[in-house]
Amino acid sequence: MIPGGQFFQQIVNGLTVGAVYALIALGYTMVYGIIELINFAHGEIYMIGAYIGTIAAALLLGAGLPAAAAIPLAIVAAAAITGLYGLSAERIAYRPLRKAGRLAPLISALGLSIFLQQYVLLAQGARDKVFPEEITSSGFTLGPVRVAFVQVLILGVAALLMVALQAFVRRTRMGRAMRCAAQDPVMASLVGVPVDRVIALTFIIGSALAAVAGVLVVMYYGKVNYLAGYTAGLKAFTAAVLGGIGNIPGAMVGGLFLGVVESLAAGYIGGEYKDVVAFVMLVVVLIVRPQGLLGVRVPDKI
Amino acid sequence: MPFGFLVGRASVAAFLGLAVLGGCAGDQGKTIRVACAGPMTGEQAKQGKDMENGAILAVDEWNAKGGVLGKKIELLVYDDAQDPKQANAVANKMFTQGVVAVDGHYNSSCTIPASEVYNQRHMVCLTPASTNPQVTDRGYPTIFRVCGRDDQQGKAGAEYVVKHMPRARVAVLDDKTTYGQGLAQEFLKHYESLSGQKVVFTGVIVKDDQDFTPTLTTMKSYNPDIVYFGGLYPQGGLIMKQMRQLGLKAAFMSGDGTYDPEFIRIAGAENAEGAYLTFIPDQEKIPAAQRVVAAYKKRFGELGPYSLYSYEAINIALQGMAKAGTTDGLKVAQAIHTMTFDTVFGPMQFDQKGDVLVSPYVMWQVRGGKLVQLPPDS
């Protein structure tokens, strides 16, 4: 194999992981953009999405549907049900604390994260759940680079959702309301923006995106367990900060950037240095650009 | 056993950093307390449960026969959450709760720090699953190992490769844990000295990750014929899957930590096909084990790889107490050193360090989606 081939293979693998980070990071960044809360339970929401997708796929395939129909349906089901989880999380854990200062919702988020993790442990057990359909091994070769179909699926779905989200925020009435609420929630409510509904919708969208990421990951790696949300959440949060927290295109760029950096670090320096390099990168970026790669400097926000 | 269940729950609470009541010291003195300690929560909760089930079976059998030294035996279950610090903490807790013998732990990285406490407090400890040489190499008198050692296991793997794939290009991966790294190094050492060849690639993966493709992509460029992995089945399964996904057709070999039906489920049966694993001979085919295997399956379902080791760890500790006529750890340990135990694995004796005398490892392979023991001469 020529050395260049290995490099491009690492890039393709890194982009795949990065696209997943980006999808999860969107949930962190949208919520932060509007209520300035770091939703530490978001990783667990992603994990729940992966479980729901796996269970839905098993049910649909068991009912005799072909994989081409069952998998998209499973993704949609996971996004819809996980969206409801996000909505309930906001109602139960965050809305009652909206006026309670910054620390209380943060602690509430940590509590919710532990609760969801243990809830899945008790309801589903500690064993890994395996995705019912083996699809990762099939793929094609592009010059020296081997690409699995599921990687194409991940990159395609992620790109589609990011474009759709950007269009929604930029072009629709609700998107405009969202941007208003992000700028100044009090003023927005005075001019008739239903801020509570906007916030609820933000949680639903963020959770649905995380659920899609969860199902894609469980198809890619083939398994999920109740602890999966922790690492993924941490990485996605890093991606959100890297790109500039509160900034939607920033989360996408941050996710892809982090994925590629990790992949190259693990490939060329060694697996044990992957996180070291990723976090050194984060520190360097934050020293040079404290607002993140695409963030806008807002002095009173951080 | 409801009591064991409650203690297990209490340990979960401890893991979460919640308050735990010492409590339940009332029965002390009336019963003899033995412990089963392992990963009862977290990713390895299944292995912890396998150990616990084996221990429950042994304790119930002894109690049905009237206990030991005229007292009933009480089993306490402790959760080390596969965390060395937690292992040390539960070891101290066992001492304060009057535990005299321990069946544990699962991970070498837990057994090693916890055994410092057992040694200091003269508690007998028999690990059913920790295979790292360090567990017994420190020469502590009350520490025993019922299973094999990684140097025996690494050697068994290396001998197989040298014999059956003499010209193979060999790559070695590990997960940087005490167990995984230790096993990989033992394999490497024995392979290089037996074959006179160098391995072509060594790499490391991080256990908490799911994506090993960066390391595997680099490994692929060295074009290995066989990959030896020191680590556990969740990562082993993902490695095999991702190797095939990257179009890497090399054979795969690993040790007892990867021996689990879950390995095949995670990798996918097609991807796992042909994988070599060193493990002990098939427990379900050992004639002496039939009665115990049947009793275990009837009560708990599928037999875990280390269930019977846990069962025998308890048996050996209690036989040692019966022989020594006391629960004093040093005297019980002395008795265990001199005895020959009639176990489901055949007669078992311990050497000076507390290791079993005979290397138990044989080669297994995944064939048709199932783990099959290879005949010794193949």
Image (cartoon, coloured by chain):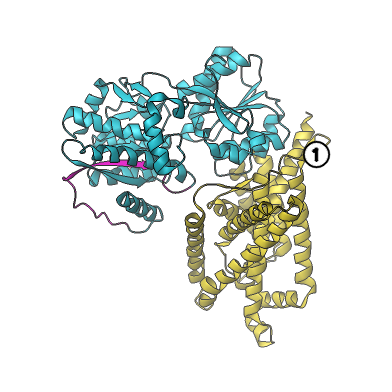
Chain colours: A yellow, B cyan
* Magenta region: B20-42
Q: Is residue A291 visible?
A: no
The image quadrant of residue A34 is bottom right
Left/right placement of residue B126 relative to residue A134 reads: left
Residue A110: x and y in percent read 49, 62
Q: Label 1 is placed on what type of residue?
A: Phe
Taking the spot 72% from the left edge, 48% from the top edge, the residue there is: A16
Relative side of A293 to B150, left or right: right
* In the depicted structure, whether residue B77 falls above or below residue B308: below
- Residue assigned mark 1: A140
Viewer-proximal residue among B345 and A7: B345
Above/below status of B152 relative to B52: above
| Quadrant of the rendered image containing residue A296 | bottom right
Residue visible at 26% across and 25% down in the picture: B336
Measured along the vertical axis of the image, is residue A210 above or below residue B246?
below
In the picture, measured across the screen, residue B46 lies left or right of residue A45, that is left
The reply to whether the magenta stretch includes residue B231 is: no
From where the camera sits, is residue B298 visible?
yes
Q: Quadrant of the N terminus of chain A?
A: top right
Give residue A8's position: percent from left, percent from top.
77, 39
The residue depicted at 75 percent of the width and 71 percent of the height is: A169
